[in-house]
Amino acid sequence: GAVVSQHPSRVICKSGTSVKIECRSLDFQATTMFWYRQFPKQSLMLMATSNEGSKATYEQGVEKDKFLINHASLTLSTLTVTSAHPEDSSFYICSANRGNEQFFGPGTRLTVL
Amino acid sequence: AQSVTQLDSQVPVFEEAPVELRCNYSSSVSVYLFWYVQYPNQGLQLLLKYLSGSTLVKSINGFEAEFNKSQTSFHLRKPSVHISDTAEYFCAVLKAAGNKLTFGGGTRVLVKP
């Protein structure tokens, strides 16, 4: 099956700093990747759709200047949380599209102090 | 737009007992249907999916789900659960012509010995 990795799996940072999360499709090419955010005991909330070679498409209410997405290659998308604040603490999950199925990464837990 | 409702947020069940997780969806267009499982602090794993053909789909670990178009449902069942089935289960739909998943709120299954 298709494998998607995320790095780091956990990150703790100070308020005001920026954090970059990587999402890689290891054994297939993905022109489209997705970034989700999940709060404790809640469902996944789609933040944005990452398109290789073009700008990401953000969902309503998601600040594009705060959550910077770059999809520079067919196997890598990055999410940068800029000027992080404690309310940005969450579990961030990416997925990559292959055909009519999405394959999910293991998630990154971000804690902002 | 699509929506997905998982009627039960939490389902406690004894080991070796059957379990059913309910999922109803609404959509004005054809959709594909998915069940994902999430273990603590991990990403989502695909459990099973309905794309077309037989309305009863099965996973390798004993779960099955039946697509009922008239009732717009895709309930998940397992005749005998194990402790290891304790997890969060998410139902999701994908527009047949789209690439964005819409998730239900999730059902937490707690298997008791």
Image (cartoon, coloured by chain):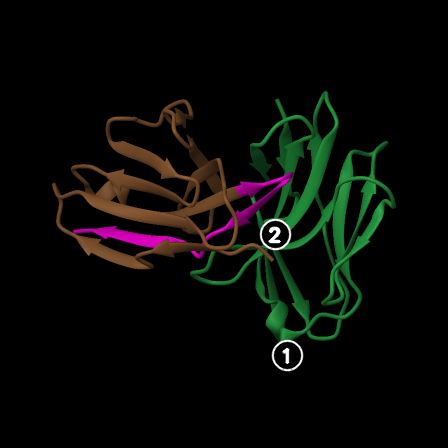
Chain colours: A brown, B green
Q: On the image, numbered disc 2 is attached to which residue?
A: B36
Question: What's the residue at 83%, 34% (across, down)?
Answer: B69
Q: Amino acid at mark 2?
A: Tyr
Q: Chain of mark 1?
A: B
Does the image show residue A43? Answer: no
Q: Is residue B44 magenta?
A: no
x and y percent of residue B17 in the render?
A: 76, 70
CA gap between label 2 and label 1 equals 24 Å
x and y percent of residue A54 in the render?
A: 38, 25
Q: How many marks on residues?
A: 2
Depth order, front residue of B11/A2: A2
x and y percent of residue B90 in the render?
A: 60, 48
Q: Chain of mark 2?
A: B
x and y percent of residue A102 in the render?
A: 57, 44
Depth order, front residue of B113/A62: A62
Depth order, front residue of B91/A72: A72
Residue A79 falls in which quadrant of the image?
top left
Residue A8 falls in which quadrant of the image?
bottom left
Question: What's the residue at 37%, 47% (across, down)?
Answer: A92
Magenta highlight: main SS: strand
Residue count near mark 2 (Cα–Cα under 10 Å), binned few <14, some 14–19, many ≥20: some
Q: Quadrant of the N terminus of chain A?
A: bottom right
Asked which secondary structure carries label 2, the reply is: strand
Question: What's the residue at 33%, 48% (across, down)?
Answer: A22
Q: Is residue A112 magenta?
A: yes
Asked which secondary structure carries label 1, the reply is: loop
Q: Amino acid at mark 1?
A: Pro
User: Which residues are the magenta region?
Assistant: A97-113
Question: What's the residue at 76%, 40% (across, down)?
Answer: B51
Q: On the image, numbered disc 1 is attached to which residue?
A: B113
Dot 2 or dot 1: first in sequence order is: 2
Which mark lies nearer to you, 2 or 1? 2
